[in-house]
Image (cartoon, helix red, strand yellow):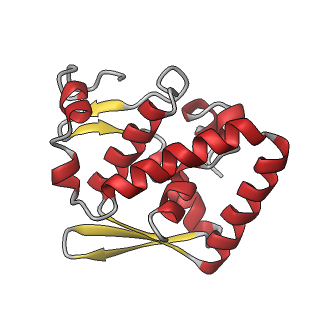
Amino acid sequence: MPEDIGEVLPDDEAMFHHRLWMIDEFDGVIDGEKKFHKSLVEYREEAELDDSWPFVRASWGPMDPGFSSILEAYDDLELVYKEKDGQIHIYKETEKGSKYIQGLINGLRILKKDQTEAREKELRLVAKVNKDRLGSEIEKDELIQKLKEAPLGSEI
């Protein structure tokens, strides 16, 4: 795994594997990088992780700076694979990825019950709201519009 992952997400939060868990909550498929980033930032806000999980203001809105390297690591581990359909990146959880995240969730429910239940609830809420929406629709959400007011390249 790339060494900079610890800088993107502190160890105490990294154990939750938010990105992989997010794909799982989307029934194993997220169609579109914009949709993925916007859903992650909405989850981050719901979970009140903004102090420990910074995003960067890109031209199209909030962007998770560790996203590419972490998804590449998941791909190398055969937990997720990415395919392209025209301009759209489609992120799919593998069977191995599904088993991994389910095992992780089950273990976290035992070790960090309250914290895990809260994360699970927040992830499910974001997935339920965004699953059938396009990234461009999510981009119009009030939270995303507020974050887009920050200067380009700034940490948000």
Does any portion of residue 55 appear in the rendered image? yes
Q: Does residue 132 appear to the left or right of 99 in the view shown?
A: left
Residue at (52, 52) in percent of width and height: 19
- Looking at this view, is 93 or 153 the one in front? 93
Q: Quadrant of residue 64?
A: top left
Q: Does residue 89 appear to the left or right of 29 in the view shown?
A: left
- Looking at this view, is 48 or 55 the one in front? 48
**Where residue 20 sits: x, y (%)?**
56, 58
Residue at (59, 30) in percent of width and height: 7
Residue at (20, 39) in percent of width and height: 141
Instruction: Say if 152 sits above or below 100 in the image.
Output: above
Q: Quadrant of residue 54?
A: top left
- Looking at this view, is 59 or 138 the one in front? 138
- Looking at this view, is 135 or 105 the one in front? 105
Instruction: Say if 147 sits above or below 29 in the image.
Output: above
Q: Does residue 116 appear to the left or right of 151 in the view shown?
A: right
**Where residue 22 sits: x, y (%)?**
50, 55
Residue at (77, 48) in percent of width and height: 108
Does any portion of residue 3 appear in the rendered image? no
**Where residue 101 sits: x, y (%)?**
67, 62
Instruction: Say if 32 sits above or below 52 in the image.
Output: below
- The quadrant of the rendering that contains the C terminus is top left
